[in-house]
Image: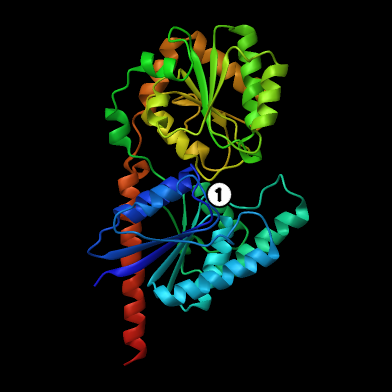
């Protein structure tokens, strides 16, 4: 009999955690697992989720990212009611808000196995101390009812140990992977794709893919572009994504006189194809779990220039397949981009080294690891139950 596994995530936007959650629920072995997906406020991937064959989909609009006490209470009660009705063997939560409310609801509903994947923490050094402490306190409470943790990076696992969320033995590192083989076999007419994006085929392209939100520091990318353009004016810049900082980015692009060389592409579903159009990939994030987009760039043979945050150094090897600098180091990022643009042989060598991603970063390996953990945890529950009945 297939065991019901319920994944809960706050919002299905075009992010690594969301895309990998969709891949997981749609690729679990149907002979062993019956997948259910619960999400909250509307997101760009909702329609895709509804169309997944064999996946039961539910949406709870009161489950939102912001802290809203009344909505949060409604979401908790709605989740608990839904889980009591579904009666899953496993609840697997993702993201901070769904992680807190989803695990609490699973505990209230008597779910035997409760798992949470850490895709980066909701508390950061950029918050006020009182806010950060409050988030940590909530994580500690939720940890008390969590059977098992997964972390997408060793850095996140170690931080969880340091702040007392769990001992190392309760957390497995399972990477948020990409479909490496599909990406590497992709055939792209880069000339046509560049023209489609409003880029000139004969000029170098530096790109970034991310939501336009404070975590990703997209304004830093605009400032990097200004420094690069000053030294190498033929360079073009491409930003794929959208969000709350779009107007601020547009104003900064105009202020820095970049309008003719900077393209804002919005959300796109052809990121692997776009990666083939880039000479250098940049990510200016202030914090991350382990950026899935780094894996997409490296699998595409594109050197990375990014920030040394959380698990970044576990995939980007500084000076080997890219460069990592401190968050906010706009000048340093620009200098590394310029170095790669000035030395195409170095950039190509770094790109080739990046293509050799270890198997743990493959998305199919990620699903297999999930299944193995599910089976082990369920077997332990059965064993403990039989022991109590002797």
- x, y percentage for residue 325? 60, 29
- x, y percentage for residue 247? 68, 30
Which class describes the residues within 10 Å of circle 1: few (<14), some (14-19), or many (20+)?
many
Q: Is residue 108 left or right of residue 369?
A: right
Viewer-proximal residue, 54 or 271?
54
Question: Which residue is identified by label 1?
Answer: 120
Image quarter in which the C terminus is found: bottom left
Report which quarter residue 98 is drawn in. bottom right
Q: Is residue 10 left or right of residue 90?
A: right
Number of numbered discs overlaid on the protein picture: 1
Q: Residue at x 60, y 41 (%)?
A: 287
- Position of 272 relative to 51 (above/below): above
| Element carrying mark 1 | loop
Q: Residue at x 41, y 65 (%)?
A: 6
- x, y percentage for residue 352? 36, 22
Image quarter in which the N terminus is found: bottom left
- Answer whether residue 220 is visible to the viewer in this image: yes
- Answer whether residue 145 is visible to the viewer in this image: no
- Position of 307 relative to 257 (above/below): below
- Position of 286 relative to 9 (above/below): above
């Amino acid at each position: 009999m297939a065991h019901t596994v319920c994944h809960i995530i706050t919002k299905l936007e075009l992010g690594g955690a969301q895309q990998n959650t969709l891949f997981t629920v749609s690729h679990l072995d149907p002979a062993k697992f019956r997948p259910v997906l619960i999400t909250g406020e509307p997101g760009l991937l909702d329609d895709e989720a509804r169309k997944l064959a064999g996946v039961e989909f539910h949406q709870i609009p009161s489950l939102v990212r912001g802290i809203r006490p009344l909505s949060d209470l409604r979401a908790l009660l709605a989740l608990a009611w839904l889980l009591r009705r579904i009666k899953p063997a496993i609840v697997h939560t993702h993201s901070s808000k769904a992680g807190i409310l989803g695990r609490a609801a699973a505990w209230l509903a008597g779910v035997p196995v409760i798992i949470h994947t850490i895709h980066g923490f909701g508390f950061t050094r950029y918050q006020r101390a009182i806010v950060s402490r409050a988030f940590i306190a909530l994580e500690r409470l939720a940890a008390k009812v969590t059977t098992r943790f997964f972390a997408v990076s060793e850095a996140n696992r170690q931080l969880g140990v340091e702040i007392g969320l769990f001992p190392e033995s309760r957390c497995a590192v399972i990477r948020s992977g990409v479909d490496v083989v599909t990406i590497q076999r992709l055939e792209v007419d880069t000339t046509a794709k560049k023209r489609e994006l409003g880029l000139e085929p004969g000029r170098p392209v530096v790109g970034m893919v991310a939501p336009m939100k404070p975590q990703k520091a997209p304004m830093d990318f605009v400032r990097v572009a200004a420094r690069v353009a000053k030294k190498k004016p033929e360079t073009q810049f491409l930003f794929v994504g959208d969000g709350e900082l779009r107007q601020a980015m547009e104003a900064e692009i105009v202020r820095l006189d970049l309008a003719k060389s900077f393209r804002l592409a919005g959300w796109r579903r052809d990121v692997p194809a776009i990666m083939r159009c880039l000479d250098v990939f940049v990510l200016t994030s202030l914090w991350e779990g382990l950026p899935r987009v780094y894996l997409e760039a490296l699998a595409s043979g594109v050197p990375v220039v990014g920030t040394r945050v959380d698990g970044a150094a576990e995939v980007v090897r500084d000076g080997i397949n890219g460069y990592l600098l401190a968050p906010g180091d706009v000048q340093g990022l620009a200098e590394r981009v310029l170095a790669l643009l000035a030395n195409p042989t170095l950039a190509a060598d770094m790109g080739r080294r990046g293509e050799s991603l270890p198997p743990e970063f493959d998305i199919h390996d990620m699903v297999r690891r999930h299944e193995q953990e599910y089976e082990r945890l369920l077997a332990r529950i059965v064993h403990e139950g039989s022991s109590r009945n002797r």
